[in-house]
Amino acid sequence: MKFNPPLVKATFLKRYRRFLVDIQTENGETITIHCPNTGSMMNCLLPNSPAWYLPSTDPERKTKGTWVIATTPFNRIANVNTHYANTLVEEALEAGIIDLGKPYVKLQREVKYGAENSRIDLCLTHKDATQTYIEVKSVTLGFEENKIAAFPDAVTTRGTKHLRELTALAEAGTRAVLIFCVNLSDIEAVRPADEIDPAYGKALRLAIEKGVEVRAYRTQMSPEEIVITDEVPVIVG
């Protein structure tokens, strides 16, 4: 995913009302931009830290841009725009960086499925008419003591529902894949954040036991682009 023009550097000041962020531009002006992340953003809200945003060219827009990259307390950067994760995974599939071992002939987004009225992020159709359902989660939570990222950063009943739906698919014989898109630098593995949402961790382990494939891929971030680079382990033990 390329940014043209590149992201603009600023200083993060504060986040409030969930969707608003105040930043200070490099010329000293304080402006309000949109926060595209509805989660807790734990360890991504460091006051007076470097940040990068995408300016808006729409004169009618209420905010002057969208926040994209944050700096964490542990000398990492994080892509906090959760809307980018699906696109990053799609681009990596097309480029062969994410290789699921079976070519696909069609890719669909936001396909309805499941008994709980869900929408899958990506649905691949293969030459033999079989399908692969892919749920994507953006990971930005990291800690100082190691290079293992964790998901989720807050209790997620929606995320647990998605795991139940994927598990049902796998049990019915349909290929189901969960991909953690690691939007955090200097990370070597991903784990469930059991200390934050034990129900999600339990559902994740059950999903794996029932045949859901769980993978994690890390990204490389800069003001010019964000791309998925390679796979890292998922630790559930």
Image (tube, rainbow, N blue to C red):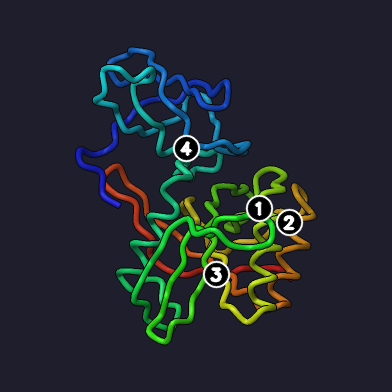
206 and 172: which one is in front?
172
Q: In 3D space, how far apart are the residues under numbered discs 3 and 2 (Cα atoms)?
A: 16 Å
* Residue occupying the point 65% across, 61% down: 191
Q: Residue 94 in the image: x percent, y percent?
A: 32, 69
Q: In the image, what residue type sits under mark 3?
A: Arg
Mark 3 or mark 2, earlier in chain: 2
Q: Residue 76 in the image: x percent, y percent?
A: 48, 45
| Residue assigned mark 4 | 71
Q: Which labelled disc corresponds to residue 200?
A: 2
Q: Which labelled disc corresponds to residue 215?
A: 3
Mark 3 or mark 1, earlier in chain: 1
Q: Nearer the viewer, mark 2 or mark 4?
A: 2
Q: In 3D space, how far apart are the residues under numbered discs 1 and 2 (Cα atoms)?
A: 7 Å
207 is higher (above) or lower (below) than 143: below
237 is higher (above) or lower (below) than 78: below
* Residue occupying the point 55% across, 56% down: 119
| Residue assigned mark 1 | 159
Q: Residue 156 in the image: x percent, y percent?
A: 69, 47
